[in-house]
Amino acid sequence: PPGFGPPPGFGPFAAYALQGTQKDAKLADARPSPAQVFQNEKKHVESLEGQPHSAQSRNDTHCSTSGSHTCRQSLRNRPPVDYSRFDNMSDEDSDVEVVEKAATSLVRRRQQLPKGVFRGCAACSDCQKVVASWNPAGARRPVLDEAPVFHPTEEEFKDTLKYIESIRPTAEPYGICRIVPPPSWKPPCLLKEKSTWENSTFSTRVQKVDKLQNRTSSKKSTRGGMMKKRRKLSEPEENSKRFGFEPGPELTLQKFQKYADYFSEQYFKKDASMNSPPSVEDIEGEYWRIVESPTEEIEVIYGADLETGSFGSGFPKLPPETKSGVEDKYAQSGWNLNNLPRLQGSVLSFEGGDISGVLVPWVYVGMCFSSFCWHVEDHHLYSLNYLHWGAPKMWYGVPGKDAVNLESAMRKHLPDLFEEQPDLLHNL
């Protein structure tokens, strides 16, 4: 679109519309105005967790429920390897293995960055020391078209699928949109109940933000006509590490919020030149600076794909012995993500099983800079994400009509990764 400069490394190869939407929710003693984000079929979406943009919004944690980076660096331009050093190698290592080790060490030396965040100590795994800080001068906030925002009336909001169908012609060209429920729709969030907040634990992922766009392929150079040694990843845990999402500490929501608050307070600490906290736009610009031009290793944690069967979805559910009460309205609502897939008129209502993440929603708990990668929704279905509370969350979407262009650009600029793993996009 006019005014949109392609990201570095993409050049003029493919023109595709990249849309952004921001889900605003302010923390207050009263429940915040919720926001619905609806992602259209056959498109790519990526989300970036935000942090507060007002002084009273102290909590930079957010909790959302979901119903359903690219990198530009190529290893082709790395320094050549002096293979003569390996003429007298030992019998224990093959020449391929020795060359691979040497090439790996060269790449690592070139890419090594100082640590900006130190997590864990001898006594615990959920403490941190933040030595990096915000660099406003290096901001790399993209210039994007804003995705449409809809404000349904009380009457329009009653029929979930009818309303979604009514906005489709407007939303589809963007691939993503935001739906703000009427002011009266304020469902209780059961995750904030004391027993859950303080005692229920969930697994987190450690995300190295500086590696999201700067991962290296495990494919190494070889000499002469030797066969390339290929490595296969068989374990899901290894695949997760490969994309920069390593297993993190088990935390409660209470401890996660404390961890997230401390990170933001330290990373965005004020100096004499700063008169106000960073805005959402400031944080977005800093995020992309870290992704595209990192100067330190920045590490955050993220609670993603949490099973709601045991942890809960945040939405109320009617017990088998239904009783009338204030929560019934929300337990029966079509916008309750426990109910949405089974609504009359949904093709998923014919599915008998409970498919996790499709018929059974997942919960996500994010902090500043935690991210969810580009992906196509399961089976190209619609996806609905509800922000229960917390700081704003940024979404980026590419409409279905431009999906092929995006995939082509990724394949062109990431040849090593796609040669190593042809189904890379499928895994993302």
Image (cartoon, rainbow, N blue to C red):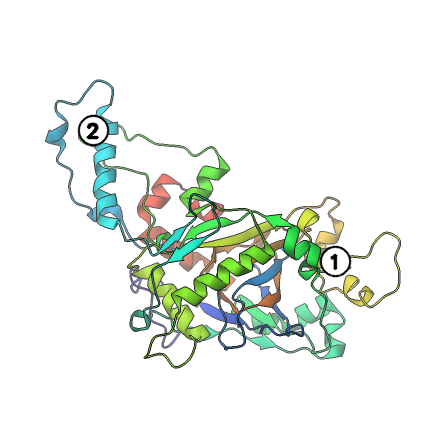
Horizontal and vertical percent position of residue 199: 65, 51
Q: Is residue 289 above or below residue 112?
A: below
- Find disc 1 in the rendering and name its residue: 339
Q: Which mark is residue 292?
A: none
* Residue sitting farthest toward the bottom: 275
- The spot of residue 12 in percent (x, y) is 30, 65
Q: Residue, x 48% and y 34% (percent of image)?
A: 235
Element type at marker 2? loop
* Horizontal side, residue 312 vs residue 377: left or right: right
The residue sitting at 32% across, 79% down in the picture is: 273
| Residue 225 numbered mark, or none | 2
In the picture, the quarter occupied by the N terminus is bottom left
Question: Callout 1: 10 Å neighbours few (<14), some, many (20+)?
Answer: some
Amino acid type at circle 2 is Gly
> Residue shown at 88%/57% (left/top)?
322
Depth check, front residue: 345 or 29: 29
Instruction: Tell me which corner region of the image, top left, top right, bottom left or bottom right, holds residue 66.
Output: bottom right
